[in-house]
Image (spheres, rainbow, N blue to C red):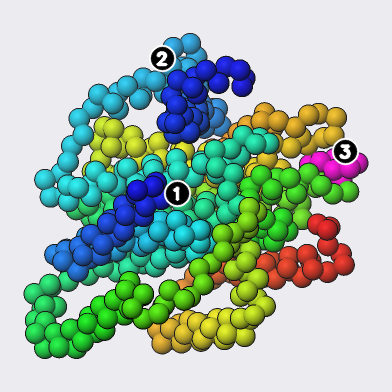
Amino acid sequence: MEAYIEPVAALFGTAWPLVWALLKIVGIIAPLFLCVAYLTLAERKVIGYMQVRIGPNRVGPRGLLQPIADGVKLLLKEVIVPSGASKGLFILGPVLALGPALAAWAVVPFSEGWVIGDVDAGLLFLLAITSIEVYGVIIAAWASNSKYAFLGGMRAAAQMVSYEIAMGFALVCVLMISSSLNLTEIVAVQAKGQWAEWGFGFLSWNWLPLFPMFIVYLISGIAETNRAPFDVVEGESEIVAGHMVEYSGMAFALFFLGEYANMILISALTSILFLGGWLSPVGFLPDGFVWLALKTSFILFLFLWFRATFPRFRYDHIMRLGWKVFIPLTLFWVVVVAVWVMSPLSIWK
Amino acid sequence: MDFQSVVFYFFSAVMVLASLRVITARNPVHAALFLVLAFFSAGGIWMLLRAEFLAIALVMVYVGAVMVLFLFVVMMLDINLERIRQGFWSYLPIGAVVGLLMVAEMAIVVGGRYFGLEGMPTPAEPEPGYSNTKELGRLLYTEYVYPFELASIVLLVAMIAAVALTLRKRTGVKKIDPAAQVAVNRDDRVRIVSMRAEKE
């Protein structure tokens, strides 16, 4: 590998670190968009089978080219800017919806050392980036100058701020037991323990000792990405499509890409923080990226499964769940875990 | 000019321009969004000073939470700018005093060598593996633990006061008790009557 890179590096001279960084970014973004495209197909297929339908099967063999056809269609459509809209912000909205969803991948490790920025404050960076995701929705909603869009934006602002707190506390528990904010470190800590030595690695991952936090994080993750059953932001039967109602063509596609990229991000994070990332579940199989991919796909499948199974929450119930159930529960668990880590019973020494 | 200076001047320029637009923008929503941009640039400058924890905390707290709630309120209000600007001349004297004071303070910092500030020690170059976050945490919970706890209690009191001020008992509210809803049995809601089929 090094032998192939050397001559290319010499070609670019001092600009090589920049070029190399750009190459790494492309190496993550391109497969990510491919995953997003096929996640939309998987969603329609999975929900189709759950509802005893076949799902898309017309474009290409077994419908496999459907996402490409959808993408081309959206690219070719006209982007209409409503005459009463705030033009600059109307364009900025979708950009801000997609941007943070991509920026967050900078600190996500895919395997031992496979990461763009192996920073010490990785978890904090993720929290900060996911907290600015809401701006895309709010700005788009306000700039559209439409009642439906505005209602969606208000709902998004309240919902995402609420669930972020519960998510943050769940992360605090994880970082307390890992005593690190570095994601690679957090995975490394999950490889240690009595169970891992006996060859049952999956029992030493964070999901077992932090089970309530795992569930809270998973559910908050669904609420944070505005997916069903927490999709009151779009709520097509109540407010048509919420913040996206005035958007068409590629501007709409950006929202779509952002939502699915966020789903993949949250699933990957859940796998890394609670399900041991790239660690193999049993001792006799090697660790590797394939495990992270499998775990992420499983969490993504849960996202789709929930969407096919549960009816939409009513808005006041969402707020109640966030503020009156999750936040007190996570606050209590932060104290419990803090005492546990410092007590003689601690399993993370 | 090295790369760091370029980045510094870029962030500073964006921040100054954004701050200017906060007070000159005609639309309150635009003003709030420019404030977001100003906070973000400030975070960038702090990052340049290797205060990554503070920088990320700034983005997380101010950009991610405070400004979202600000926007939430500002978007719903129909703010009449003419009325806000009415008091401009009567507030000008006190505003000018505060402004001049800030200019004077900045002059002291920027023109430090006239006031003997260059005698202050510059922080040592941190060795590799130095974690700003860890150092900050250690200081907060050892040396400054009492002021820190005091500050958090003040915040807690403010939080409880805010809740107490807005909390009022309303009568005749059709409030839902989810626990009661979950605890309902089938027999509480449905009564199955067995009866013979009737013919008209």
Question: Which one is nearer the viewer's eye here, A197 or B129?
Answer: B129
Picture quarter containing residue B14?
Answer: bottom left
Location of residue B88 with respect to A339 vertically, above or below: below
Q: Nearer the viewer, mark 3 or mark 1?
A: 3
The residue at which mark 3 appears reads as: A199
The residue at which mark 2 appears reads as: A59
Residue A130 shown left or right of residue B33 in the figure: right
Q: Main secondary structure of the magenta part?
A: helix
Q: Are marks 2 and 1 on the same chain?
A: yes
Q: For mark 1, name the chain.
A: A
Q: Quadrant of the N terminus of chain A?
A: top right
Image coords of residue A231 (percent x, y): 43, 49
Residue type at the position of mark 2: Val
Q: Earlier along the polypeptide chain: callout 3 or callout 1?
A: 3
Image coords of residue B55 (percent x, y): 46, 61
Location of residue B149 with respect to A87 vertically, above or below: below
Marks 3/2: CA–CA distance: 46 Å
Q: Specify the farthest residue to the right.
A: A198
**Magenta region, residue range:** A195-202
Mark 2 Cα within 10 Å, few/some/many (few <14, many 20+)? Answer: few
Image coords of residue A301 (percent x, y): 59, 36
Dot 1: element: loop
- Look at 28% across and 32% down and name the residue there: A250
**Dots 3 and 1: beta carbons under 8 Å?**
no
Could you tell me if residue A36 is visible in this image?
Answer: no
Q: Quadrant of the C terminus of chain A?
A: bottom right
The residue at which mark 1 appears reads as: A226
Question: Which one is nearer the viewer's eye here, B62 or B189?
Answer: B62
Location of residue A124 with respect to A331 vertically, above or below: above
Q: Is residue A199 magenta?
A: yes
Picture quarter containing residue B113?
Answer: bottom left
